[in-house]
Structures are given as structure tokens and as C-alpha cells.
Amino acid sequence: MTDQAGALGSPQAVSGPALKPKAGKPSVRLRKLWIGLLLPVFVLTVWQIAGWSGIVSSTILPTPSTIFVSFWELASTGELFGHMKISLFRAAVGFLLGGALGLTAGLAVGFSGRVEDTLDPSLQMLRTIPHLAVTPLFILWFGFGEFSKVLLIAKGAFFPLYVNTFLGIRGVDSKLFEVAKVLEFSRWKQIVRLVLPAALPNILLGLRLSLGVAWLGLVVAELMGSSEGIGYLILDARQFSQTSIVFVGILIFAIVGKATDSLVRYFEKRLLRWRDSFNG
């Protein structure tokens, strides 16, 4: 009997298997990273070979190595980072303005049917208007300055967060409110402890979509008339047929857009650890 108790109480009996999942996490992340890199590496390899063999003209489609040389030249002179700083500032201010207004409007419309009847029809009409359609008006009203560019970015960032916040609140199960009444939750406690946590997945999805549309708005804003920014760099390079620099600008938009999306996904996983969802 004492031998069995000693065996159960020994470190060997309780150690080992429980720690294995944690040890395997880094290798799983690394494997996912390598799988994600397979397609880009394959495309770049085929692209480079096609350029070397002369199948595609270097003027129309420069090779990845040529694009990297152009990137290095722009980065070494500091010109690229100067344009990046301006673009990041515009995108950040426009996203914060549009996102804050979209979140506020989504909360107001989601919590009040009367506010929905008043605001939502007009907002849904404005949502369908393309960026390019309002660009001439923004230039006419506000000129070519920073204000018009920030407003155009804010317009794009507003609607995804507004729609997803509204849908997230309205998608909360009504049975949860019955439970809240039994527990005698106040209105404020219902919002903070019940509605917002249940709507958080939709709100975070809206945040990701708003970031993506903000980058699209930035491109339109900088192409409509600017002397600084990545969009201006692309437009200027196009006029002089510097295709490799055009690809550098596109690459910057892709990398920064992916980085911001990954950052939001990281916080999404941290905030939604309680959710038991399908991971594929």
C-alpha cells in the first residue's frame, strides 16, 4: 500500500505528457509559417526565371531581384522612409477618425431602434458610394491638402466598423437578456458584461476590415494629388516608366497592410481566448 502511494506521489507519475503540448507550440507556429511562405516563394521563383529567360519584358514586369535593387537604392537614400512616414501618418489619422466614428455610430444604432430608423437608411446609402465618386467633391471642397486626404481615408474606415458593430450587437442571443433579468443586471451591466463581450468578435472583424479599406483609401487619396507619400512615389514612377519603383510602392502597401492585419489578429486571439471556435 505504501509502495503504491509512493509511486503515485513521485514526480515521475505526474510529469511528462501534460507539458508536451506547450513544448510543441513553437514548432507548430514555425510549420505554419513555412507553409504560408511556400506560395510566395514559388511565385517569386517562377517570376525570376521568366525574367531571366526573356519570356517577359523587364520594362513591363521587372524581376524580383531588380525590384529589390530599387528598394535598396530608395531605402539607402532615405527617400523611401520619408514617403512611408507621411503615408503611415495619413493612414493612422484617417483610420482613427473613421474607426472611432464608425464604432460610436454602430453602438448607438445597435442599442437603439429609434436611432437605427433615423441614421441607418442614410448611412447605408452613403456606404455604397465609391471612393472615386466622391474624390472630385473632396478636392473641390477641401483642396489638395492633408484634410481632404484624411477625410477620404476616414470615409473608407468608417463603414466596415459601423456595420460589423451594429450586426454584432443585434446578433446577441435574446435568451441571454432573459438570464440577465433573472440575475437582476442593470442596463449598464447588461451592456458591459453581456452585449459587448458577445459582439466583440464582430467588432474585431470590423476593425480588420476597416484597416484594409483605410489602406485602399490612402492609395486613392495620394494618387488624387500629392507631393509626398507612397502613392505619390508610385504615380511619379509610372510617369517615368520606372516599373520597378512602382512595384516597390505596391510591396510596401502589401507588407504594411499585412503587418497591421496580423497585429489585430494577435489581439483578437488574446481577447477571444474564451471562444471555442473551429480552427480548420
Image (cartoon, rainbow, N blue to C red):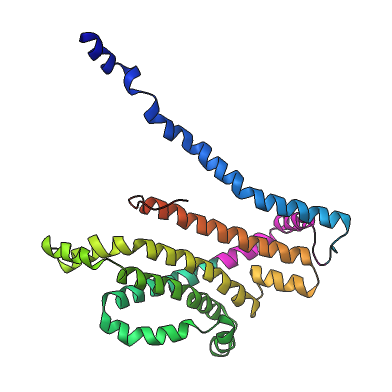
Q: Give the quadrant of residue 73.
A: bottom right
Q: Which residues are magenta?
A: 60-88
The residue depicted at 88 percent of the width and 55 percent of the height is 53
Q: Position of residue 262 (x, y in %)?
A: 51, 55
| SS majority, magenta | helix
Q: Is residue 55 visible?
A: yes
Total tally of numbered discs in the picture: 0
Q: Is residue 196 left or right of residue 96?
A: left
Q: Is residue 99 magenta?
A: no
Q: Residue at x 53, y 71 (%)?
A: 213
Q: Position of residue 113 (x, y in %)?
A: 27, 81
For residue 184, say whether it is visible. no
Q: Taking 127 as reference, is 62 above or below it?
A: above
**x and y percentages locating residue 51 in the rendered image:** 83, 57
On screen, residue 254 above or below 151? above
- Taking the magenta stretch, the answer to whether it contains residue 80 is yes
Where residue 42 sits in the image (x, y, percent)? 71, 51
Residue 225: quadrant of the picture: bottom right
Q: Which residue is more in the foreground, 94 or 122?
A: 122
Q: Is residue 60 left or right of residue 170?
A: right
Nearer to the camera, 153 or 42: 42
